[in-house]
Amino acid sequence: KQEVTQIPAALSVPEGENLVLNCSFTDSAIYNLQWFRQDPGKGLTSLLLIQSSQREQTSGRLNASLDKSSGRSTLYIAASQPGDSATYLCAVGDAGANSKLTFGKGITLSVRP
Amino acid sequence: GAGVSQSPSNKVTEKGKDVELRCDPISGHTALYWYRQSLGQGLEFLIYFQGNSAPDKSGLPSDRFSAERTGGSVSTLTIQRTQQEDSAVYLCASSINRGSGYTFGSGTRLTVV
């Protein structure tokens, strides 16, 4: 059974700092990996999707990497802003036919002005 | 529509009553998923639809839960004889195919009193 871990559960940084959010998973037989953002009381917003054959994806100030063999992904946020404050969720896509996602519990990020 | 639409956004119901939650996926998205997010818990997979069929119902927590999808589009999640532990945010997501990643709706917050 796939397990996804995100540590720490919460993180507080000053504005402008570059930061890395970590995600680890137990079963390397994945189809893809997706990073989401969730604001309080809201649904999930997709940030980046990495296919199992890819090593990284970039969008603006965000860069996500994937090391399937070691069961790790990182989300790099450059020059953090208060508006980046949210919960960041890592989700691993199952290699089976249904492609269901297994989620970590998320990292709650607070960027202080 | 442009995104995944869920209704109602909030639902308060008395214990023992039945509820129906609706999901309208992005047009053309053949895959549809239901997840549940309980307070302090991660997202939990409930059911997967491909077209109108549900090849994976393994996440439904009890036989009080059922879901259907008609016309390859709208899906309804029904919870019969609701219990307080059913209180959660129910999220729906759709995907055009396995490799394209998920788009989530804003969810239905269900409170059973």
Image: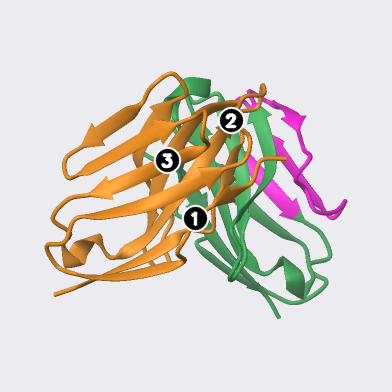
The residue labelled by disc 1 is A6
Q: The orange chain is which one?
A: A
Q: Which of B92 and A54 is in front in this view?
A: A54
Spatial CA distance of label 3 from label 2 is 11 Å
Task: For the N terminus of chain B, give its image quadrant.
Answer: top left
Whether residue B70 is visible here, answered yes or no, is: no
User: Nearer the N terminus, badge 2 or badge 1?
Assistant: 1
Helix, strand or loop under label 2: loop
**Label 2 in the same subunit as label 1:** yes
Callout 1, which amino acid?
Answer: Gln
Q: Position of residue A80 (x, y in %)?
A: 17, 59
> Label 2 to label 1, Cα distance in Å?
16 Å
Sort mark 1 into few (<14), some (14-19) or many (20+) by Cα contacts within 10 Å. Answer: many
Which residue is at 74% across, 77% downward?
Answer: B14
Q: How far apart are marks 1 and 3 (CA)?
A: 10 Å
Q: In this view, does B60 lie to the left or right of A85?
A: right
In the image, what residue occupies the spot 18% across and 67% down? A82
Which SS class for mark 1?
loop
| Amino acid on which disc 2 is placed | Ser
- Picture coordinates of residue A24, whole percent (x, y): 51, 45
Q: Is mark 3 on a helix, strand or loop?
A: strand
Name the residue type under label 3.
Answer: Ser
Which color is chain B depicted in?
green
Q: Name the residue under label 3.
A: A73
User: Which chain is disc 2 placed on?
Assistant: A
Q: Mark 2 points at which residue?
A: A28
Q: Specify start and end residues of the magenta stretch as a single range.
A: B50-78
Subunit of label 1: A
Badge 1 or badge 3: first in the primary sequence: 1
Residue at the far front: name it: A70
Query: Residue A65 vs residue A32: left or right?
Result: left
Q: Residue at x 75, y 75 (%)?
A: B84
